Amino acid sequence: MGREGIIAMIDLLWLDGTWSAPGKRSAASEALRLSLDSTRVRFRYVDYPATFGPATGVGDISPAESISAGMVGLTFAVAESPNVCAVGGYSQGAMAAVAFAREILPQRTNLEVVAVGALGNPHQLTHSGRAGIAGPLSVPRPYFSVYAPFDPIADLPMGSPLRSVADLTEWMSIRSPEAGKRWAVDNVEKLAKQKAQAWWAPWRWHDIENAIRDATFYLGTKHTTDYVTGGYAVKLARMIEQVA
């Protein structure tokens, strides 16, 4: 249902990941944009700081402030849209979209949002004993959240030690191969130290070794271009089109 009783066109209001800015978009978000049927879905980026404190630049605001700004940006974008809306995001942007749906939409019943979409979602729902690294969260709307297998941000074992050793101020700043390598190397070192400290508990070694493996996936493409080459951005596009 829309303003005319039938949804003829929807606006997909999208927040990209950390470091996003006009002319500097993630491969995952661009693949989604290019895969959508433009006669049914109008894609629009909603810009927000997309920063992570000093991890992205001296003087940059904290991730919590950046996510809050993304929520405010979505609120204005939905209110100003001439069409029924879907909202969503990639990585840090997904966190902002989820927070908007959970915290703003229940209070602003005048905002017409028919779905929430996400790629590389830190709040990915539980699936086969795995979930997003920041913990699974539901939203009060149809929820289309797509993950690439073994992306440690969106597809991490629930009991992984990586959840306790990963510094959120580091993993949320992943956007470039260089940043990914720094994150992976740092956490592999932390996990190796944790294993050394647990020499007396060999039953923990397997979990720690698996967490080391998950961390090293950042040396590859699991949280970045796999969303393009694996067809996951296209998959989300087809899901979003279902509500148009």
Image (spheres, rainbow, N blue to C red):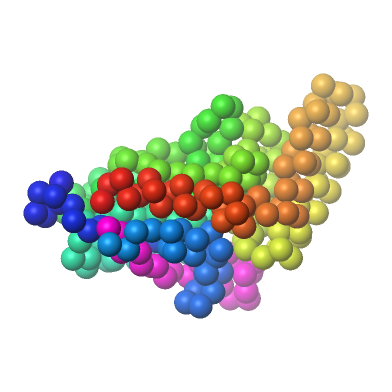
* Location of residue 105 with respect to 15 vertically, above or below: above
Q: Position of residue 25 (x, y in %)?
A: 52, 69
Q: How many marks?
A: 0
The image quarter containing residue 33 is bottom left
The foreground one among 218 and 63 is: 218
In magenta segment, residue 21: no
Hey, which quadrant is residue 140 in on the image? top left
81 or 133, nearer to the observer: 81
**Residue 106 visible (yes or no):** yes
Residue 78 in the image: state x and y as whole percent. 26, 61
Q: Which residues are magenta?
A: 40-63
Identity of the residue drawn at 27% across and 47% down: 243
Please name the residue shown 42% across and 70% down the image: 47
Locate residue 177 relative to residue 134 in the image: left or right: right
Give the main secondary structure, helix, strand or loop, of the magenta stretch: loop
Q: Position of residue 129 (x, y in %)?
A: 58, 27
Residue situated furthest left in the rendering: 4
Instruction: Give coordinates of residue 46: x percent, y percent.
Output: 38, 67
**Depth check, front residue: 221 or 61:** 221
User: Which image quadrant is residue 43 in?
Assistant: bottom left
Q: Residue at x 80, y 54 (%)?
A: 185
Which residue corresponds to the image point at 51% horizontal and 32% vertical from the top-left? 126
Magenta region includes residue 53: yes
Q: Is residue 126 left or right of residue 170?
A: left
With 21 as the anchor, is 44 left or right in this view? left
Residue 75 can be seen, yes or no: no
